[in-house]
Image: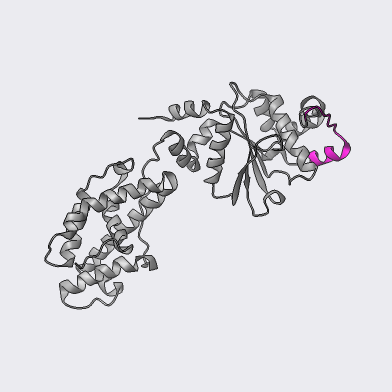
Amino acid sequence: MVTNYQYRRQILALDDDQLEEFVRQWALKKTEYVEVERFTGTGDRGRDVVGFLSTQRHEGPWHNYQCKQYGRTLPTETGISELGKVLYYAFKGEFTSPAKFLFVAPRGINRNLKSLIFKPSTFKATMLAEWEKYCAHTIVKNEHIPMDDELKAFIKAWDFSRIAPISVDIMLTDPAAIPVLYHWFGADPGPAPVGLAPLDVQAIELPYIQGLLDTYSEREGAVFADHAVAGVHAVYGPHLRMQRERYFDADAFTRFYRDNTSTKDTDDLRHEILHGIYETHAAKHDDMLSRVNAVMIQAANTQPAGPLAKYARTPVKQGICHHFVNEGQLKWKM
């Protein structure tokens, strides 16, 4: 079994470009961003990976992920210099000031820089007092950028509590990183949450529910006009509720793994189940409801292959069959 320790080692082995791409893909999974952009080359203005919080992009709020893959903890001078560069170009009007400035340093940051980050007023005072030492000669190559009154006022106005470090441990525990760890290192995404059927029938359910109503009608020799009628029936009410539980458990399962693995993995599992129930579905049955129940038993007994198989609970495998009905791949009437 692969452990977080092994993923940690793999992240620490990434080079600078790989780390930036890893972070870009991670940021893309965060729901707070409307867009994510990676800036490379000499014109990056201190930006590595940017998460935009609005369609205004650099005219609105944004987060800067400053990615540094060092063989040691991130040095104080590097941290101050990189922040100074971004604030300088914000001062020059290249973009708005970042709403957050995040140091992505897998090996962590040194004790002094960490102390500054956790004391924002001290960090601000240090940058202002030691601009010449840390920033004046590092913003533009072979150029001296002095601290004048306007720049000083701009930096004073910026909130240094917006700075935060991101370690490899934070990456490994952030749910948004799960699909990235899966794609890069084959990380186990873990089990999907159990889906819960809402009390009210949803529009998306109507095709498979109508299929079930048809089976009930055939068995009883009387038409079940809608799901409300079936829902109060002594026999078919519990049956219908059980099928809805299965449908929504399969729905939650599929959504979770499409977000955290790949569409191919969920499609492969569905393909395995479809093959597993094929002969049972095609066989002769006393009536349509007998076919439904036989298929449910066979789906439960099907042992699919692939990375998601161990998490495919019995209700999930059965619920996928109702999704097949919804999509027109399966019909109860032969």
Q: Is residue 312 above or below residue 43?
A: below
Residue at 64%, 43% (x, y): give it: 63
Measured from the top left, where is residue 262 in percent x and y? 41, 45
What residue range appears in magenta? Answer: 141-157
The colour scheme applied to this rendered structure is one colour
With 217 as the anchor, is 263 left or right in this view?
right
Whether residue 112 is situated above or below residue 89 in the rendered picture: above
Q: Quadrant of residue 196?
A: bottom left
Q: Residue 87: which quarter of the image?
A: top right
Q: Residue at x 84, y 29 (%)?
A: 144
User: Which quarter of the figure has residue 328?
Assistant: bottom left
| Quadrant containing the C terminus in the rendered view | bottom left
Q: Could you tell me if residue 121 is visible in this image?
A: no
Q: Depth check: 315 or 50 in front? A: 50
For the image, the number of numbered tags is 0
Q: Position of residue 60 (x, y in %)?
A: 70, 51
The residue sitting at the right extreme is 149
Residue at far top of view: 72
Residue at 66% x, 46% y: name it.
62
Measured as percent of width and height from the top left, residue 128 is found at: 80, 32
Asked whether 142 falls inside the magenta stretch, the response is yes
The reply, left or right, for residue 11 in relation to residue 239 is: right
Q: Position of residue 27 (x, y in %)?
A: 56, 43
Q: Nearer the viewer, residue 306 or 84?
A: 306
Report the residue at 79% width, 45% height from top: 93
Left or right: where 119 falls relative to 168: right
Whether residue 139 can be seen here:
yes
Left or right, residue 234 beside residue 84: left
Look at the picture and state if 248 lies above or below 262: below
**Magenta stretch holds residue 230:** no
Q: Quadrant of the N terminus?
A: top left
